[in-house]
Image (cartoon, coloured by chain):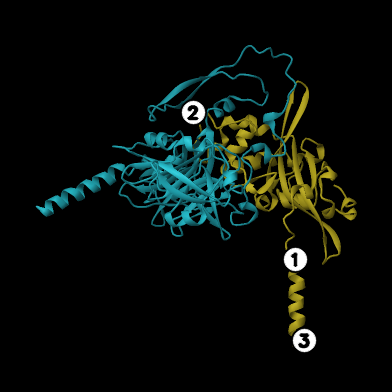
Amino acid sequence: MKNLRFSITLGFVITTIVSFSQTVDWQYFKMNGNECQIFITKGNSRIIVPANCFWLNGKPYQGPLTLAFKEYKDQADFIFGDLTLRYEVNGKLNTLQSGGMFEIDIKTESAKTLSFAPKKTVVVKFAIEPKFDVAGLEPYYFDPVTKNWIKNTRFGKTKESNQPISDNQSDLWQDDPLVAQFNRDPEWNGDNVDCYTIQVVDRKNPNQTIDTLICPQGYNPLDSRYNSYLSDQAFKTMQIDKMGLFNYDKIFNDENNVPMFVKLKTKDGKPFELTDRLYVVYKVTNSVIYYTKEELAEKFSLLPRNDIKIFVYNADGRISRVPDSFWKNFDARLMRGKTIELPFETLKLARLTKEEFAKYAGL
Amino acid sequence: MNKAIIFIAFIVSFSKANAQSPALALEDMKHYRIQLDNRSNRHLMGVPKQLLDGYCKGIYKAYYPKAVFNEVNFGDFLSHFRWGEPVLNETVLCGDDYCSNIAYNELFSRFNMYLDYYEHNFYNNQTARMERKVEFVQLVYSIDVAGKLYIFKGPLFRLDEIEKTILVKNDSNNAEPQSIKYTFELARFYSVEITDKDLKTKEKRTNQEDNFQEH
């Protein structure tokens, strides 16, 4: 009887953990190795696979293969995917600000791992969430051995390349065509707008594309039909020659961080026990900062911003968050070296979808 | 013992003389512009197209003019110049041909008028001479609107990354194509300096350098 009760309890625990362990789904694309294919993902990214791109056991492979792809677009995806944005370089621990990540794995039909042929690359044109599209995002690769991100550029390990840089394109270029003032073409009277139709991925049914009518507004001689589409969807390009996890990233500028001490309590004033990571997210920046219980006592800090979200996400489905009302009169600049008491309210959800999680966490 | 000291001193002085100069900012270099349809420069006409094709394919890396150690993503380059990827209901070429999509043609053609470059002038202790080294080549976007030419400086390419594969061919003779490095070393073109000298920090720019011969 005791064994039966134990088994039922264990089964319940496992079921609970499994049901709350949200993950980002793999997407699968099939092709032959001797073909060239462009795949459109559910997130509207493009994967361009050239012909004869892969090898099996040191020889060219032209047979059937499956390309598995995961897209991580925002903070909720990073948390559900258990992905870190910590980046250590030149002895300094940084946090990365992401334009999105993807994971790619390509195998034969019999699940044998393929390698890339010499000088061949798969091009991923990642459809970035427009609200997270900032300047200066560069390619990173997650080293599965060291568990650290590696900046995949020529100067990726240098000090000069690992400084925070502006989010604004205009700060990084000498000239900015976006703000240029043009003399209007005297023959253009504002009429005769050239409308055209493009196909975009249907967000309700990602397996289909739908026609969308584009009618350019305003006047700028630099505009093109491609630019009008761009305003709806921008892409970041990366050439990859190995399997794994990749990121379009930049160093999160946290030089204005205010160090402070922190105490956690429940809404009714009792001590709040931290059983998992405490997440700090700035809503308009695509990054996730976390603290373990030990780190919380040593190096907690906040940026003086008004889009702070702090929460704890437990594997059993509980989310504890600092309510938005707490931040209304909070000014991090006044808290340097002082102790902040964070009140947590907890919600227990029967089943947690990404949307529910994002909504409750305030993302 | 003395021999050892002399040897070490020699090694130190040799390595100092050959040490790379500290990273210079763009404003500390001389900035030149090549007009590509000039009769003396026509052999360079194909360079912007070669750069853009290679950039699109990921062969060449482009850098931000104000952050020369940070790469410009090709997507950011497109959006900076108000462009985008080919739309899906057009014929989209696959694989290595993706960059030949007609969607790019008009944009790429707007870089055909000028080519800029930046060179670093320095005094070489070993040769006791002023020397020059081209560090960056820069694409320049130009567009004629209602009779007025608008020019926008584009991304930078490091010469040492493109020198072996960007080839320059003189259509007026049957000579073998030359590397772009060789062309720039010999300054086989006509260019004008357009750098605003006031932008350069005084301590890095000397009178001697200012008097250095222009091309």
- In the picture, residue A69 is in which quadrant? top left
Q: Label 1, on which residue?
A: B18
Q: Label 2, on which residue?
A: B88
Chain where mark 3 sits: B
Percent of width and height locating residue A229: 54, 26
Chain where mark 1 sits: B
- How packed is label 1: few (under 14 Cα within 10 Å), some, or many (20 or more)? few
Going by the picture, which residue comes out furthest to the front?
A269
Residue drawn at point x = 47 percent, y = 44 percent: A101
- Asked which secondary structure carries label 3, the reply is helix
- How packed is label 2: few (under 14 Cα within 10 Å), some, or many (20 or more)? few
The hue in which chain B appears in the rendered picture of the protein: yellow
Q: Distance between the residues labelled 1 and 3?
A: 24 Å
Residue closer to the observer: B146 or B76? B76
- At label 2, which amino acid type do we have? Leu
Please indicate whether residue B46 sits to the left or right of residue A70 in the image. right
- At label 3, which amino acid type do we have? Asn
Going by the picture, which residue comes out furthest to the bottom?
B1
Residue A35 appears in the rendering: no
Q: How far apart are marks 2 and 1 (CA)?
A: 52 Å
- Asked which secondary structure carries label 1, the reply is helix
Residue B188 appears in the rendering: yes
Do the residues marked 2 and 1 share a common chain?
A: yes
Q: Label 3, on which residue?
A: B2
Do the residues marked 3 and 2 share a common chain?
A: yes
The hue in which chain A appears in the rendered picture of the protein: cyan
